[in-house]
Amino acid sequence: MKVLAMVLAGGQGSRLHPLTAERSKPAVPFGGRYRIADFVLSNMVNSEIRGIYMMVQYKSQSLIEHVAKAWGNSNAYTGQFVTVVPPQMREGPEWFQGTSDAVFQNINLIERHSPDLVAVFGADHIYRMDVRQMIDFHRRNSAHVSVAAIPVPLAEASSFGIIDADKRQRIRGFLEKPANPPAMLSDPTRAYGSMGNYLFNTEVLLKALREANELGEHDFGHHILPRLIKTHQVLAYNFADNHVPGVADYEEQSYWRDVGNIDAYYDAHYDVLSAKPRFNLFNPKWFINSSAYQGPSPMITGEISNSTIAAGSRVSGARIKNSMLRREVIVEEDVEIEDSLIMDYTVIRRGSRLKRVIVDRYNVIEENSRIGFDAAADRARYTVSDGGIVVLAKGEDIAGVTRYQI
């Protein structure tokens, strides 16, 4: 069965500001070496779906360059590709107006490949998923459309787009952040949250896209899917039934996070940081790919506990606890970093103290700085999240500091 993936990666990510001030949400760094978009692309490739179009729009240059570096080898074989597609404006002068419009504006790519199924997935989430298992569910149940659904506790369900499904998993309705979400019939303590990942029979998708365009509609969740549930077999695929090889017993088996705001993004990092994390990024049976960075191993002196330090970094006599340092971070003497995320090419000068801070790329923290200790002072200079996380926006490239950048 031939499957074509259309990955939606144009999200502005305004709630992740200032991390999205100069890049799209899928391009935001995550963990020690990844971008958010790497997770959906890795899921596709590991699921043996090798034809992937990634549609970009908002401040896309960073993501375009990353995909070229990290995923360029995917184009080495016939029928295998990861291709970035900016708005082509084939139907007029408009940018992508919504999720379905992004696919409609590239309907020629679907027709060119003539797949049996089209996987329309978002690029905004941190998770592992064997998409082939969802395809098997789709085929076994003679679905026209399948929607990935994650069980969420009823107490949290009002924060999600919720799916109402009958006992045969046929979807009866979609509710956007309902005050009284309907429970799953199989588990009255949980509700189905929509993951924004869809499988379509190709002919159903093409017809629905053309109808939506004629009606001036632009979104899958708000327009196309609510109309299709009245006429087609639209099913909810239970993500809890998806089992990826190599996941350890101590991990959260159906891990999926929408890192749509600063606090959720920050918390997700602590799901991957420990000896037995909720989501272990090291899984040889389900590799998460990213850029082939060629910098040297880190050089470290100091006291380091429960932290990760990426290649090319240099730590000189510092104390680092419960933190992540990405590549080419320089930390001078007598620095203390706790519960913080430090992105690439940052310099932290001697005597500084950082706690519950996210530092975006290309920043210089001057000597004896104190960040994360005085809420009023932090708000006057930086962005502070609802949960009290201090965020430093991306700085300027620092001549003579970024030694190994490719």
Image: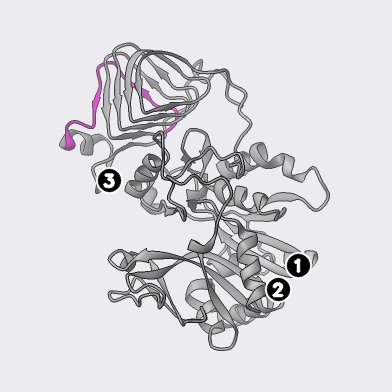
Q: Position of residue 397 (x, y in %)?
A: 48, 26
The image quadrant where one finds the N terminus is: bottom right
Residue drawn 61% across the image and 47% down it: 42
Residue drawn 65% across the image and 60% down it: 132
**Image disc number at residue 13:** none
Q: Position of residue 392 (x, y in %)?
A: 34, 35
Pointer 2 with pointer 1, Cβ within 8 A: yes
Measured in 3D between alpha carbons, the distance from the residue under mark 3 to the one under mark 1, in whole angstroms, is: 44 Å
Q: Which residue is mark 1?
A: 115
The residue carrying pointer 2 sits among few (fewer than 14), some (14 to 19) or many (20 or more) residues within 10 Å by Cα, namely many
Q: Secondary structure at mark 2?
A: helix
Residue lying at the far bottom in this picture: please name it: 231
Q: With 380 as the anchor, is 335 left or right in this view? A: right
Amino acid at circle 2: Thr
Q: Which residue is mark 2?
A: 202
Measured in 3D between alpha carbons, the distance from the residue under mark 3 to the one under mark 2, in whole angstroms, is: 42 Å
Q: Quadrant of residue 273?
A: top left
Quick check: is 101 in the magenta stretch? no
Residue lying at the far right in this picture: please name it: 78
Say above or below: 365 vs 49. Answer: above
Q: Position of residue 210 (x, y in %)?
A: 65, 78
Residue drawn 51% across the image and 40% down it: 281
Stretch of the chain drawn in magenta = 360-375
